[in-house]
Amino acid sequence: MHVGRSWFRVVKTRDIPEALEARYGRPGRRPRPILDCLVRTILSQNTTDRLRDQAFSLLTRKFPSWKKMRSARVSEISRTISVAGLHEQKARAIKALLEIAGDHGYDLSFICKMKPEDAYSFLRGVKGIGDKTAKVCLLFSCGMPFFPVDTHIARVARRLGLAGEKWARERVSKRLEELFDPRDYYSLHLNLIELGRELCKPRGPRCGECPVGEVCEYGG
């Protein structure tokens, strides 16, 4: 929810979540089954939300059950999701995930009952699931204290001076987990993405409108 220019005065890093919520609101978590989240997040890599959703729709129409999708050839899955790009890579990751999910009756809810570090290790053990995909679904589906970092968040964090210019996203993620309260991870994750899309763009950032510009090294 966009509520206009933030009135909130940002003095320290810890004020950032509240300042962003003054502009964008505090989104509530709407968890979806973790297997569904994982497939969607794999499809989202290096593409838009619209193309991700289109690919997921095509995939679930072509294979109306996880079991049928699991038994499909990688090439079939790849052709079906080609609209989202990187389709061969994504198809292999989806296939590897479903091989494991099938062993658990396609119900991965047990992951949400694991210790966070064990759940993260379990997902990272699946070929094709990286740091961001694992953390997105553990945060979104399980409410676990992880801070996933995408292109927008990495850019904003570096400009704010919260992360080094050459830091890998995984290192940026760990730093943000150290800096902020876990209760703010979900809201802050979404609002930093919104900030990156609306104002803190790769080119021509609108620094004068930024609700956290007072603590930004790049804009200040």
Image (tube, rainbow, N blue to C red):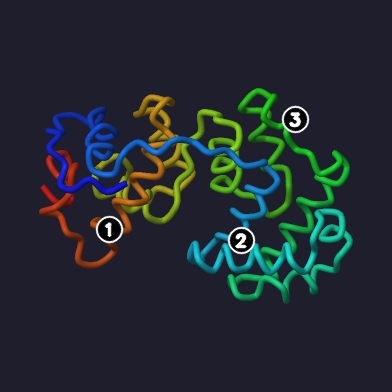
CA separation in Å, label 1 and label 2: 23 Å
- In this orientation, which residue lies closer to the viewer: 219 or 56? 56
Ranked by sequence position, the earlier of labels 2 and 3 is 2
Say whether marks 1 and 2 touch (CB < 8 Å): no
Disc sitting over residue 43 in the figure: 2
Does the residue at mark 1 contact the one at mark 3 (Cβ under 8 Å)? no
Q: How many marks?
A: 3
Tell me the element at label 1.
helix
Dot label at residue 198: 1
Residue 182 sits in which quadrant?
top left
Answer with left or right where residue 90 lies relative to residue 7. Answer: right
The residue positioned 25% from the left and 49% from the top of the image is 159
Q: Earlier in the sequence, mark 1 or mark 3?
A: 3
Quadrant of residue 66 in the image?
Answer: bottom right
> In the image, residue 191 lies at what x, y percent?
34, 44
Q: Residue flagged by tag 2: what amino acid is it?
A: Leu
| Image height of 49 relative to 127, above or below | below
Q: Amino acid at mark 1?
A: Glu
The kind of secondary structure element at disc 3 is helix
Q: Earlier in the sequence, mark 1 or mark 2?
A: 2
Real-space Cα separation, disc 1 to disc 3, in angstroms? 37 Å
In the displayed structure, 56 sits above or below 13; it is below
**Where's residue 13, x and y in %?**
24, 31
Q: Which residue is mark 3?
A: 110
